[in-house]
């Protein structure tokens, strides 16, 4: 059993009502997502300010430190204390972070929503990532995942201004669902939760409402996850990195539809899933 | 007449074909957007690496320096030379950038797609921004803009994995249309083009396919633009900042529909635009 850090439990209010006017001048009240700064202090040293929805600030903090490769093991972290009075999170490590100055000095501003800034050297790590060669994904599990996301209650559905990420087990059962104002915060919060719960990514499936840019794909690889699904698309570099890691990328996941871009050998097609009714719908141009 | 910097003209290939497999195992070829690193050197000092589509790298570089408030006037820049052989852009200033070390040391990782990293102090500037108090926007111009975007040929429409931004004149004529893998790159490239062409934002309308998070709203304000339109939504902080600057935020712009969130006095409603046909469509739940 791993020693878990001491955590605050400071999930914040996710939504905020504002009065708007529509195109006919009619007043309405709509909900918009919160967006708040969270300044991270590691052993009293200011590291970064993240802009976040605030739903899972402790997991976000842990996942950020993990995905930036600033902390190797969760056991190195003694506590994570969020205080929204000052929009800050104080992280206490057991042994400090070696070379923190040097390791956080190089900026790569990426195409991600959210944590666009990745401290240098991530691309160097791509070649060291080994994904489980035997992991397979059934087509029926893809359908189950898309269906689960579709029925999930979410801030996204109410406000449309956040990104959602989810982690699924090999049988398509939902493990975590996280939303944030940026895709990268959501994926980092999932990385933080996996760390806390000592969950391996080797047979898991990662789903994102957002685009699979290179940084998202690299983060998925770092978490050891062989399957990345998105309702949206990918980029040339996301595609290249996924291919290099032998990861399966599935984009345009909607209904029973998807496009399989890389790692094609990992997908187990089940043609019987696509029956006559579906064919008819397809003929209608759905 | 301002002295323009000497620019390379290094727009790169925007799209890349890949072979994919659909849910029936059929092979297809689809186009995905490019995503490439562009490392910026200012007077031979490495500043940042941006991940970009590569369509307007010189304007992106200029707009980045402008929106980060690292360079005050375009006349301070002698040349911008992009070289895709080494994925780098060399910026030569006339007098150097004072305190560059200090000014680029503070990281705020924001919710933006794209250039998530904003060097500190942006929020401090919000209160110093003065938008033209007399700028007004006609409802018919909103409709014209949404229609123009709708008919625009774009990488987005082909690949769905980029964000588009556009600048419109007060009469709804398109001035610039820029796409990039991240929203922030697209807005920065527009800022760069405005700088090059000495175009003021005071009566302009800015359109984004992406969400209007706080950083997008602040960048719009820095460019002096009183009107921000989005097909998507905003966040609580985007809303708060827009209200504080007296900027008009219009979200959910689609067809003739929109929601006006802030700066309501700037919009000139034209009820006659919404005729009977439109009412019928609305009754059908459009």
Image (cartoon, coloured by chain):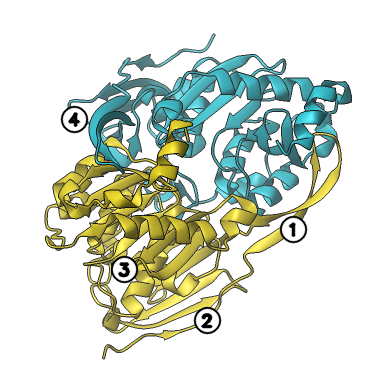
Chain colours: A yellow, B cyan
Query: Does residue B107 appear anywhere in the picture?
Result: no
Q: Kindly state the secondary structure of the residue where label 4 is placed.
A: loop
Q: Secondary structure at mark 2?
A: loop
Q: State the image coordinates of residue B241 (x, y, percent, origin top left).
A: 68, 48
Given contact means CB atoms under 8 Å apart, are the residues at marks 4 and 2 in contact?
no
3D distance between C-alphas at marks 1 and 2: 24 Å
- Is the C-beta separation of discs 1 and 4 under 8 Å? no
Q: What residue did someone put label 4 on?
A: B86
Q: Spatial distance from mark 4 to mark 2, Cα to Cα?
A: 46 Å
**Numbered disc 1: secondary structure:** strand
For residue A9, the mark is 2
Label 3 CA crowd tier, 10 Å (few <14, some 14–19, many 20+)? some
Q: Is residue A201 above or below residue B50?
A: below
Q: Is residue A123 left or right of residue A214?
A: left
In this rendered view, identify the residue nearer to me: A254 or B49: A254
Q: Residue furthest front?
A: A276
Q: Characterize the local packing of mark 2: few (<14), some (14-19) or many (20 or more) Cα atoms within 10 angstroms.
A: some
**Neighbourhood count class around disc 4 (C-alpha, 10 Å): few under 14, some 14–19, many 20 upward:** few
Report helix, strand or loop for mark 3: loop
Marks 1 and 3, how far apart at CA: 38 Å
Q: Residue at x 46, y 66 (%)?
A: A177
First along the sequence among labels 2 and 3: 2
Chain to which the residue tagged by mark 1 belongs:
A
Q: Which residue is mark 3?
A: A171
């Amino acid at each position: 059993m791993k020693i878990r850090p001491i955590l605050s439990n400071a999930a914040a209010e996710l939504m905020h009502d504002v009065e708007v006017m529509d195109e006919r001048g009619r007043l309405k009240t709509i909900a918009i997502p919160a967006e708040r700064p969270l300044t991270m202090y590691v052993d009293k040293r200011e590291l970064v300010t993240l802009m976040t929805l605030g739903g899972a600030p402790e997991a976000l903090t842990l996942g950020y430190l993990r995905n930036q490769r600033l902390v190797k093991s969760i056991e190195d972290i003694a506590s994570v204390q969020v205080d929204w009075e000052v929009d800050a999170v104080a992280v206490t490590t057991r042994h400090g972070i070696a070379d923190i100055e040097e390791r956080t000095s190089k900026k790569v501003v990426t195409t991600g929503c959210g944590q666009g800034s990745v401290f240098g050297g991530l691309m160097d790590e791509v070649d060291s990532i080994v994904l489980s060669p035997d992991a397979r994904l059934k087509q029926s599990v893809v359908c189950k995942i898309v269906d689960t996301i579709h029925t999930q209650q979410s801030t996204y559905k109410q406000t449309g201004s956040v990104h959602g990420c989810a982690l699924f087990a090999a049988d398509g059962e939902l493990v975590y669902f996280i939303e944030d104002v940026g895709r990268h915060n959501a994926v980092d919060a999932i990385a933080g939760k996996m760390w806390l719960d000592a969950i391996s990514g080797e047979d898991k499936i990662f789903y994102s409402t957002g685009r699979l840019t290179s940084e998202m794909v690299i983060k998925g690889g770092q978490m050891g996850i062989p399957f990345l699904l998105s309702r949206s698309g990918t980029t040339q570099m996301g595609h290249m990195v996924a291919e290099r890691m032998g990861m399966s990328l599935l984009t345009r996941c909607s209904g029973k539809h998807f496009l399989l871009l890389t790692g094609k050998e990992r997908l187990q097609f089940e043609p019987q899933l696509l029956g006559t009714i579906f064919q008819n719908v397809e003929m209608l141009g759905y």
